Amino acid sequence: MGELQSAPALLLLEDGTLFRGKAAGKIGTTGGEICFNTGMTGYQEIFTDPSYFGQLLVTTNAHIGNYGTKKTETESHSIKIAGLICKNFTWQYSRQRADESIQDYFEEEGLVGISDVDTRALVRHIRSKGAMNAIISSEILDVEALKQKLKEVPDMNGLELASKVSTKEVYTMGDPHASLRIAVLDYGVKRNILECFAERGCYLKVFPAKTELKTLKEFVPHGYFLSNGPGDPAPMDYAVNTIKSILEEDHPVFGICLGHQLLARAVDLPTYKMHHGHRGINHPVKNLVNGKCEITSQNHGFGVDHEVIKKNSDKVTITHVNLNDDTIEGIQIVGKKAFSVQYHPEASPGPHDARYLFDEFIRLMKNEPS
Amino acid sequence: MPKDNSIKSVLIIGSGPIIIGQACEFDYSGTQASRSLREEGIEVTLINSNPATIMTDPVTADNIYLLPLTVESIIQILEERQIDAVLPTMGGQTALNLTIEAGNQGVWEKYKVKMIGVDLDAIELTENREAFRQHMIDIGLDVAPSHIANSFLEGKEAAQKIGYPLVIRPSYTLGGTGGSFVHKADEFDAALRRGLDLSPTHEVLVEKAVLGWKEFELELLRDDNDNVVIICTVENVDPMGIHTGDSITVAPAMTLSDTAYQDMRNQAIQAMRSLGNFAGGCNIQFAQNPETEKLIVIEINPRVSRSSALASKATGYPIAKIATKLAIGYTLDELKNQITKTTSAYFEPTLDYVIVKMPRWNFAKFLGSDHQLGLQMKSVGEVMAIGRNFLEALQKACQSLENNRMGLGADKKEWIRTADVLERMEKPSDDRIFRIKDALRLGVPAKTIHKLTRIDPWFINQIKQLVSMEQHLMRYNVAEDIPDDFLRSLKEVGYSDAQIAWLLRITEKEVTNHRKQVGIRRTYKMVDTCAAEFEAQTPYFYSTFDKENESIPTTGKKKVLVLGSGPNRIGQGIEFDYCCVHGLLAAKEVGYEAIMVNCNPETVSTDFDIADKLYFEPVFWEHLEEILDLEKPDGVIVQLGGQTALKLAEEFHKRGIKIFGTSYTNMDLAEDRGAFSDLLKELGIPYPHYGVAEDTDAALRIAKEVSYPVLVRPSYVLGGQRMRIVINDEELERHVLTIFKHMPDNKVLIDQFLERAKEAEIDAICDGDEVHIMGIMEHIEPAGVHSGDSAAVLPTYSLSVEAISKMVEYAEKLAKALDIRGLINIQFAIKGDQVYVIEANPRASRTTPFIAKAYKVPYLQIATKVMLGTHKLKDFDIKPQPSGFAIKVPVFSFDKFPNVDKNLGPEMKSTGESIRFIKDLSDPFFRKLDRDRNMYLTR
């Protein structure tokens, strides 16, 4: 639908598929790997989630922008997606507590987007062809020129991105006098993960991705948290090595998303690039420990290989599985107080069903029975 | 937890006759439940007194009891059959009340029947307003401040404490009956008295009014393992103050941030988990303060409800079907998503389209009724529309209503006086959404409209976009001038060609031709529960103007398109859904691909697995034409969708599209009063004198000719709208003038009124050679009362053998003369030995399902096969199984319209019907009806 006076824009996929639409946000050109998220709420949280760094995001919800944007409903200090592809980009918003419209927000943040795209056709395309690179432009309207530009977009496979979004400086959060201290390895951590810990009375120190155990230990933490983040875990040897050394300590370890993949790699289990990933806030997960189910928020394009995991029950126990495709959603390292989940228990956006995991980690740190 | 194998036989309780607030959505849920149980090898017994339902058909259940919904009936069933469990959550409040009553009398215990899918304590808790309020407070959720009152004095005290505006809600009533807003102290006494009177427990809740807060509804499912999912979130466009059933609603929620939504989701789950431990569906309503985003819980229904039917159609997730599986012990993670067939049923559907539900009112039928909307539901039906954006869905909903609107305005029905429009902002009625558009067009600021209506500015601003697009469009003179991109934008926001034509003052044909020429065509998208993340197996489609078309027509198979009847309204309701379901099943059986088109979310015929393919679209010409262009079916069936489908026959005929069954020319002959009378004359069949008038003078002249009393009505209306019996010139003049005022361009029919005549009707099937009389029904009420409002007895009980044989003779003559292929309904008036034909309807009628049920013959299936031409009547061995008499009893919803004229007359007022079997004429139920007949005669 879009506004009457929008400028034209193009979306070109690596396989040559072309979509025409209208410019949304800043006029410009942007490339990245294309992925889709099926959530119906929480667009701003998604845009600012560091795990989306370098990706062109397709939102499947019919309207984007209806409730504007709000400074406090972000997962990091800036927009992390590389570009937005949507159906109806709604400039006029309604929410008394909002700060500004999505258009103003995008212009301030310099984000390029495209609207009026048949996003459903696009999702069906990605579903069958898999994730691939793409480019959006509202300034280069010549398809050949855009093709050249698309070649410059790096391949996500084997791409290390965590260190690009990780904090450069160490910072703390929560009550310094709290009885529990958590050392957070920031590979692109979402603000709400930290808040879930802080709310539960923990004191956090957030370290840059490449921090070594020696430095972490100076904080005398009760537990270590391995954060979510963007990119492929395969080239992240620095992180795997640190985690290996953490595992040698007898402290509780909790990993989310990329942190989950890195934990698996730390016990020498492989990760792989998925066909088109899981991104949305309606993914069904079953907790195999207590038999209960939870609706989860997910955002990952890589996963832990479930065939290999099943053969390595001496190293890891599967704690959670995805009810749609049986993929691994949670593991526990055998003989260690280390566990991780592929999805996002902090949600934001998404259901809060899995927030009990933060409590479990705290119980583990307190050495209480779960 | 797997299925409970101790349950081998289940009783499902239906919701009875259609009344306002409890309509055919419960036929939909009951039918799904029954099919869901039979899939598991469980024997299903069904009780419902409503004969027009598909749930009480042998295709749905194993044992059917068309009995009054009473404890006695339940005992009768339990005496006759081994029932292991009862599922009371599929039949609305009626079924629950009956279950509770039977429980109180110890019936379930005595017959060792287990109650499944429900927790009676939870029901009691949610129905008892004070207990519910206290419970919510106890679990830490907010509710509106309120006090309970059992007496007038207590009510007054409560009002004093709470202050105005406030709400009075009687306990244990349905659809908000008896509830009202009180803005000022002097209105309070009357409202309180009415509320106390209408509550069966003489109890009301006096509550602080949260007028203007935003209103949301969540549909939840919970299993035995306490897993809970939210199937759908619905936002009401009309904020707090208007009953949800009367609100325009939209899904998904349009103006909720994730933080606000998750807060609501958490509270909903917490509330549901706090209510006992039943497995099944639940609906929760919240009000949200738009300023602080604080929530209060309004109401919880721990059962399948009207909104769960809507949510099922809106998302594709069959709530009743899954809720039933949960009731017999399955957990959600053990079940598959019914649409994708590969992923889990434990998930939350996600939409990549927008749903708009719009209520359908029938105020014209309730003369003297208060048209203002409020706490009490007044609509009689609803439509659902699907689009790729809000405006498209909204305009498609308007096109679905069958109110002669072409969309949201731009169709010469607009109001032009700002003062009138503003008045309607404050006093909402059935046309408020149209008036908002008018107001914006007249330059009223969006802010003012928000202030008056409290509708969220987002919706108002969306509508405002339409106004600016129209202003832009009006710069052009002919269709060819409109730039292609702009024309596409107009179509994308739902404009029909007719609206564009009206704005340019050109013909619709010019717009359509040009549009097709530049290649702007509808594409079809699938409703798949998952926004295309997974491949879906279910052919459930809606149209839009996006790039990719997903509906790929099959080739090499014969195809038939079945037209549904649109929204329920008085005179056209659930009976046509029953007809369509059978039509679809019969067409499939004889090798056709059966394609369904309808826009009524309460129907079984639009369930995802009844037709081979479903287009959830307005039964509106432009939409149909595009489906026809794409599918190229062998023909269409118009006899099963009531007058809605029938009136489209002309368009099909004009475009050379085959109509299965009776030809258009012959159907038109039956509908055209003049030509039909000529035919009757030719056949030597008596008919009442009549005349057609185009002005008042002619009307007076004709009335003199046919002699008073006369029956006056506009031609081409449904359910006898504006039909009156008048006895002198004065009355005639007054009535004819109102017809011309309200229905310009219409003619007036004046019929001789056969005083003290009896009325009777025949439904028949004809295959061109042979006529089969399905049944002859005699009305208990005399001529003058609309046939839909009359109690009809099958077979006749007082008519002479001579009169009956004349009726049969005339029916056969007429069916043959009209070359009927399929169904025909003929109405007669009988005075002495003289039999007059009043009218003939060349289609399925209100009584067809009734006869099929009473005689246990699948008449609709037979008729469909005759229409399709695959069978002749001689191919069937039709063996009616009459037992005594069957009486069709009309049911009214007058309690919703306290001031309405309850006298019956030529204009139909009943909303539903029930069936009653009697052994003989000494039955007290019949005797009473027959006695009441005299009341009409003495009036």
Image (spheres, rainbow, N blue to C red):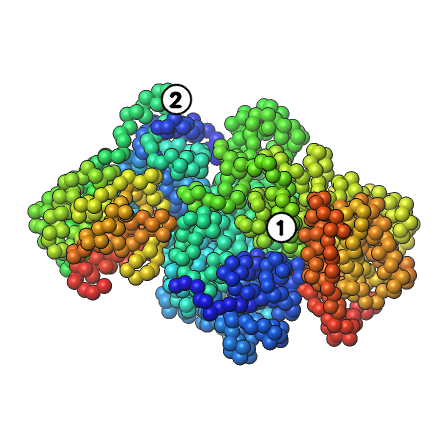
Q: Decide if residue B40 is on the left or right side of residue A192.
A: right
Q: Position of residue B157 (x, y in %)?
A: 49, 73
Mark yes or no: residue B341 visible: yes
Quick one: label 2, few (<14), some, or many (20+) residues within 10 Å?
A: some
Residue tagged by mark 1? B585
Residue B470, placed above or below residue B604: above
Where residue A131 sits in the image (x, y, percent)?
34, 35
Amino acid type, residue under disc 1 in the picture = Leu
Near mark 1 (Cα within 10 A), the count class, few <14, some 14-19 or many ≥20, is: many
A300 vs A95, left or right, is: left
The quadrant the C terminus of chain A occupies is bottom left
Residue B567 is at least partly visible in this image: no
Q: Quadrant of residue B476?
A: top right
Q: Please say if A341 is above or below B209.
A: above
Task: Please give the chain letter of the residue carrying mark 2.
Answer: A
Question: Considering depth in this image, is B398 or A94 the residue closer to the camera?
Answer: B398
Identify the element where label 1 is drawn: helix
Please report the residue visible at 22 percent of the width from the left and 36 percent of the height from the top.
Answer: A161
- In the drawing, what numbered circle is on residue A143? 2
Q: Is residue B621 left or right of residue B147?
A: right
Secondary element type, mark 2: helix
- Between the C-alphas of marks 2 and 1, the distance is 51 Å
The structure residue drawn at horizontal position 23% and vertical position 34%, both measured from the top left corner, is: A159
Chain letter for the residue marked with disc 1 in the picture = B
Q: Amino acid type of disc 2?
A: Val
Indicate whether A87 appears above or below B86. above
